[in-house]
Image (tube, rainbow, N blue to C red):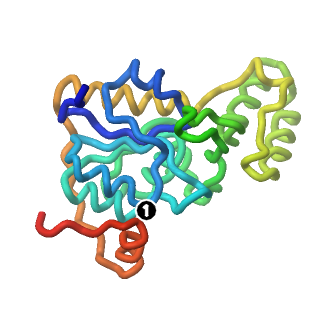
């Protein structure tokens, strides 16, 4: 069945299952975005692009310039939860729309480590199921445990710092705290999809005014490496 032209493109992976996402929004769901993927998505002229998950280490990450280029073509770009929250925090002054607590966290504290949202996950063909826990979720879970009296605030802080020192593929919420688990990335992903669904229902999408990014050699090299090139004309 073909998708309606009013369907946004959403890059989604371990933050939320595609089955759960499909219950919220009718969209063209694609695996976590890497270099060139948002540029490619623009060829379908979607009413919006939602960036939730992106590639962190297995391939080049999604570039700022391709997001700016998408917005310069009049396509609003939304970000939340993971790579989307990072890019939205960085590009909010240019008009990228951020959603959720993690986005607001990175906007307020711009020097926070990018890998706080990173996880390892299964291949996209197997549903991109997360194989580790994001530090942002661990931090929220341990804070919740302390508020509920399941541990002291000092214990929660010490565990957070201990886990933060580990490489992100090794980070897991300790079994003793599973009862207080908070999946903040999932919450923020749902919030982004719900916002897109409201725009879709009203067929009223945000207008964006963004200048095209400069044609620097580094970006042109990125495009060439991805077997892409800028289209002629508007």
Q: Is residue 147 left or right of residue 194?
A: right
The secondary structure type at the circle numbered 1 is loop
Q: Which residue is mark 1?
A: 63
Q: Residue at x 55, y 45 (%)?
A: 105
Q: Quadrant of residue 7?
A: top left
The answer to whether residue 85 is visible is: no
Q: Residue at x 82, y 19 (%)?
A: 149
The answer to whether residue 136 is visible is: yes
Front in this rendered view, residue 24 or 210: 24
Q: Residue at x 39, y 30 (%)?
A: 193
Q: Residue at x 12, y 63 (%)?
A: 234
Residue most toward the left?
233
- Compared to 208, does 30 lie above or below? above
Instruction: Give the percent coordinates (x, y) of residue 50.
Output: 37, 41
Q: Is residue 223 left or right of residue 2?
A: right
Residue most toward the bottom?
217
């Amino acid at each position: 069945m073909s998708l309606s032209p009013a369907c946004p493109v959403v890059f989604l992976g371990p933050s939320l299952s595609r089955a759960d996402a499909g219950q919220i929004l009718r969209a063209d769901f694609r695996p976590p975005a890497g270099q060139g993927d948002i540029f490619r998505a623009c060829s379908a002229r979607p009413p919006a692009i939602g960036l939730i998950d992106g590639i962190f280490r297995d391939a080049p990450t999604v570039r700022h310039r391709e997001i700016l280029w998408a917005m310069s073509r009049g396509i609003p770009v939304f970000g939340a939860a993971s790579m989307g929250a990072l890019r939205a925090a960085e590009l909010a002054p240019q008009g990228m729309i951020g959603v959720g607590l993690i986005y607001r966290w990175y906007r307020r504290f711009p020097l926070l480590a990018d890998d706080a949202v990173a996880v390892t996950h299964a291949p996209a063909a197997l549903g991109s199921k997360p194989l580790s826990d994001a530090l942002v979720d661990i931090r929220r879970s341990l804070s919740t445990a302390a508020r509920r009296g399941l541990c002291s605030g000092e214990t929660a802080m010490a565990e957070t710092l201990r886990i933060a020192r580990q490489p992100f593929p090794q980070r897991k919420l300790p079994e003793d705290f599973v009862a207080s688990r908070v999946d903040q990335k999932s919450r923020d992903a749902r919030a982004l999809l719900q916002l897109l669904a409201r725009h879709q229902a009203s067929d009223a999408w945000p207008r964006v005014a963004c200048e095209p990014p400069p044609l620097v050699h580094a970006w042109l090299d990125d495009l060439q490496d991805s077997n892409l090139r800028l289209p002629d004309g508007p």
